Image: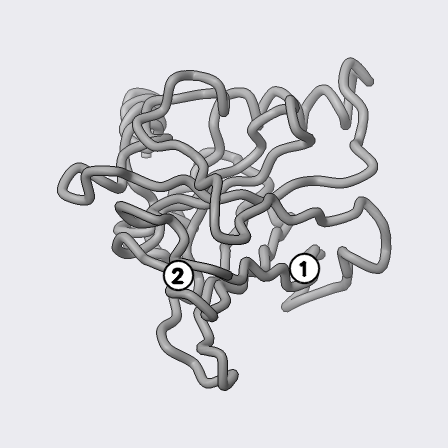
Amino acid sequence: MDLLDKASWKRRMSGLIVPFLDPVAVREAARDLGMGFHSVWDVWCTGPDGKLKWADIGLHNLMPDEGEQWILEVAFSEAQSVPAAFQIGLTDETVPATSIDEFTTETTIADGVDGTEPSANGYARQAVNSDGTDWTVALDAGDYRAVSKVVTFTASGGSIPPTGAVDWMFLVTGAAGKLVSAVALSTGRVILDGDSLNTSIRVKASE
């Protein structure tokens, strides 16, 4: 891949929904560009009886510019600091026909995304503490990987969202923090009353 192709690929990646790309091609292109981190989200829904209803496993994330900058400034310039806890949240689309587009052109959680966070029926952002309990770091196939604990969103008193569907999940450094990562679900999802949406993030550092 020459320099022009690399630049073109990077521009395309900033405007595409990563989960619909071939994972092997994404990893190979990322290595060719010298990227050192990649992450995937595992998302699944269980009913009140604990039985699996659906699963989106291995969804490749989109990293907005703000997330890239935050990671580099934490690691090298100390212009940013690691929060006591990250937050994982959901966004819903009130018009499902135009869903799966919120974060493809946005860089921050406050950029006026098409969807909004749910605000009823038990929804609340879920915390993942910045410690060795909520994150496990270990070698995996020769490279180090961090795996988050499983967090759960349970609908109570109605569905999440009440109208529309959940189509994106995101990771931020706090209530008014930096947008580190976002991922599109394979399709818009509704968490029915009593159901639970579960997720865990896997982040790997590699050459």
Q: Where does label 2 land, which residue?
A: 191
Looking at the image, the residue that sits furthest to the front is 157
SS for tag 1?
strand
- Locate residue 204 relative to residue 127 in the image: left or right: left
Q: Closest to the observer: 93 or 168? A: 93
Q: Residue at x 80, y 44 (%)?
A: 130
Instruction: Judge whether 23 appears above or below 205 on screen.
Output: below
**Percent coordinates x, y for residue 167 in the rendering:** 33, 47
| Label 2: element kind | loop
Type of residue at label 1?
Val
Q: Which residue is mark 1?
A: 147
**In the image, what residue occupies the spot 53% across and 37% down?**
181
Which of the two marks, 1 or 2, is nearer to us in this view? 2
x and y, in percent, of residue 45 in the image:
44, 70
Residue 56 location in percent, x, y?
A: 38, 65
Q: Is residue 81 visible?
A: yes
* Residue at 53%, 62% in the rendered image: 154
> Label for residue 186?
none
State the scheme by which the image is colored. Answer: one colour
